[in-house]
Image (cartoon, grey):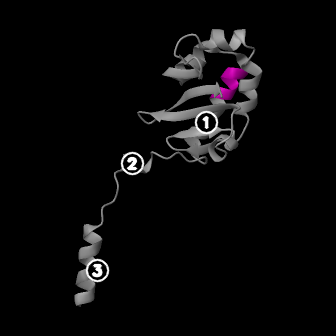
Amino acid sequence: MLLILALAVCCAACHTPPKEAQHTSAKTGDAAFQSFVAQVRKAVAKRDMQLLASMMTPDFGYRLEPVGEGPGVFQYWDQNSLWHELQLILNERFVPNGAYMVAPPQFATDPQYHGYRAGFTQVNGVWKFAYFVSG
């Protein structure tokens, strides 16, 4: 009886993290994420800048050095002929990397990786395209 009482007290003292905390690490099987990736891929294939802009974070990162964020991304991609490279990266498998889902997977696993990479994150529970950079 004492063992059951001790077990009950221990279970009652256990803290279940809030639902928000449980969703901070992204999952590749998430239907909302897979749908978002498909929409981004279609928008990039069509070069639908208006749709893409609505899917990006306001501080979207497009260049590491010098830092390029926010407005100017589409002009940068046009000037540097990056649309095809972006399509290739978006067709890679995405994996969790902290608060982001990133592609290609090598970016998350190889500290020496210096190629192009894309990252998506959740903002207020909604997936957003956060960056596409090289470096």
Assign the magenta stretch its main secondary structure.
Answer: helix
Label 1 sits on a secondary structure element that is helix
Judged from the image, the secondary structure of the residue bearing numbered disc 2 is helix
Q: Quadrant of residue 46?
A: top right
Q: 100 or 40, which lies in front?
A: 100
Contact between marks 2 and 3 (CB within 8 A): the answer is no
Query: Which residue reaches farthest bottom?
Result: 1
In the rendered view of the protein, which quadrant contains the N terminus? bottom left
**Which residue in the structure is indicated by mark 3?**
7
x and y percentages locating residue 25 in the rendered image: 49, 47
With 122 as the anchor, is 120 left or right in this view? right
State which mark lies toward you, 1 or 2: 2
Q: Which mark is residue 21?
A: 2
Which x, y percent locates residue 115?
71, 32
- Give the residues drawn in magenta, as a range: 40-45
Residue at x-position 39% and y-position 48%: 21
Q: Amino acid at mark 1?
A: Ser
Q: Nearer the viewer, residue 47 or 77?
A: 77
- Given contact means CB atoms under 8 Å apart, are the residues at marks 1 and 2 in contact? no
In the picture, the disc for residue 35 is 1
The kind of secondary structure element at disc 3 is helix
In the rendered image, residue 102 lying in the magenta stretch gets the answer no
The mark that comes first in sequence, 3 or 1, is 3
Q: Amino acid at mark 2?
A: Ala
